[in-house]
Amino acid sequence: MPEHKPLYRWSLEDAVRHNEREAWRESYRENCDCARAIERAIAENYHDNRLEDGTQGVIARYGFDRVNLVLSNTIQQMEHDGRFSPENKEWARQTYIPEDEARWHYRVESHPGLTNLFVNQVRQAWQALGLFDKSHCTEEQNYEGKLLVLKPSVLKDQYKSPDYQLFYAEDGFGCNPKARGRKVFGFFLKDGEQTNYNRGDFLGVISEEHLPDWAREKLAEMTAPNEGENQEMTMGGM
């Protein structure tokens, strides 16, 4: 799977303020290229009053996050067009897109009805990933010692799976919602890789009812007492 260019999610004004103009420019160009690729995919896959699924190549080239952003941007700018379904309009509203004047350049200009069908296909491909969302989490606010769910947007496409969304929080000021610090330190439950994220990168603590069996077993192993330590403690007390 190719490495996708980083998606810059903030405005040009923010980029200038933080000396990130070049990052904004590169992402903007890629957004425009993505919009044109979607237009070509729609044109090439529309035959006999039917739109075949042409999403795979576009998603592989640009990644889910950019494709979702470009399509959401398109619908947000055409909010009053009745050819977009209410469900897709609601979906598009969930994506934050900064109010840059240049954002119209990465609006998909294909027929709105066909673009709506393309959005349906992309959303179906996304649903097929089986990712966790906010509905799979509890209302717990203290993250320390808890199994958390990462937002899909934090993960590269090759790791966009429910297994890689599960992150065990060990410590960090970000575990406490009232702390000034935002870092949460821990590891991926899937492979044990140690790293850290900001508190805002998580959806929350996964609820017990949605915990996969493999994750439940790993947590049990982590919390099980060490037999060697138990034996040593017992012998020391004799």
Image (cartoon, grey):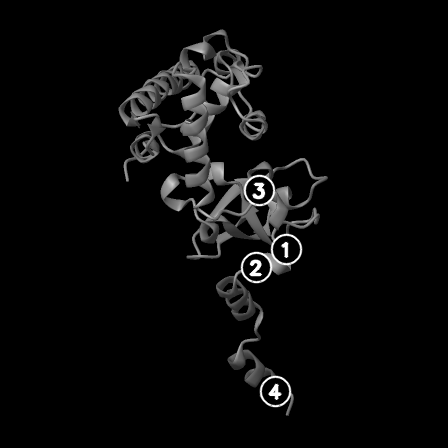
Q: Residue 207: give its label.
A: 1
How far apart are the two marked residues, 3 and 4, measured between alpha carbons? 41 Å
Q: Which amino acid type is shown beneath numbered disc 1? A: Ser
Query: Is the Cβ of the residue at disc 2 closer than 8 Å to that at disc 1?
Result: yes
Residue 8 in view of the camera: no
Classify mark 1: residues with Cα within 10 Å, few (<14), some (14-19) or many (20+).
some
Q: Between residues 32 and 40, which one lies in front from this camera angle?
A: 40
Q: Residue 202: give its label.
A: 3
Q: Residue furthest front?
A: 48
Label 4 sits on a secondary structure element that is helix
Res. 134 image quadrant: top right
N-terminal of the two: label 4 or label 2?
A: 2
Q: Which callout, 1 or 3, points to the residue nearer the camera? A: 1
Classify mark 2: residues with Cα within 10 Å, few (<14), some (14-19) or many (20+).
some
Residue that label 4 marks: 234
With 70 as the anchor, is 55 left or right in this view? left
Q: Residue 158: give its label.
A: none
N-terminal of the two: label 1 or label 3?
A: 3
Q: Residue furthest bottom?
A: 238
Query: Is the Cβ of the residue at disc 3 closer than 8 Å to that at disc 4?
Result: no
Q: Which amino acid type is shown beneath numbered disc 2? A: Leu
N-terminal of the two: label 1 or label 4?
A: 1
Residue that label 2 marks: 211
Q: Which amino acid type is shown beneath numbered disc 4? A: Thr
Label 3 sits on a secondary structure element that is strand
Q: Which callout, 3 or 4, points to the residue nearer the camera? A: 3
Quarter of the N terminus within the rendering: top left
Q: Residue 157, image x and y in percent? A: 38, 40
Q: Which amino acid type is shown beneath numbered disc 3? A: Phe
Q: Between residues 142 and 8, which one lies in front from this camera angle?
A: 8
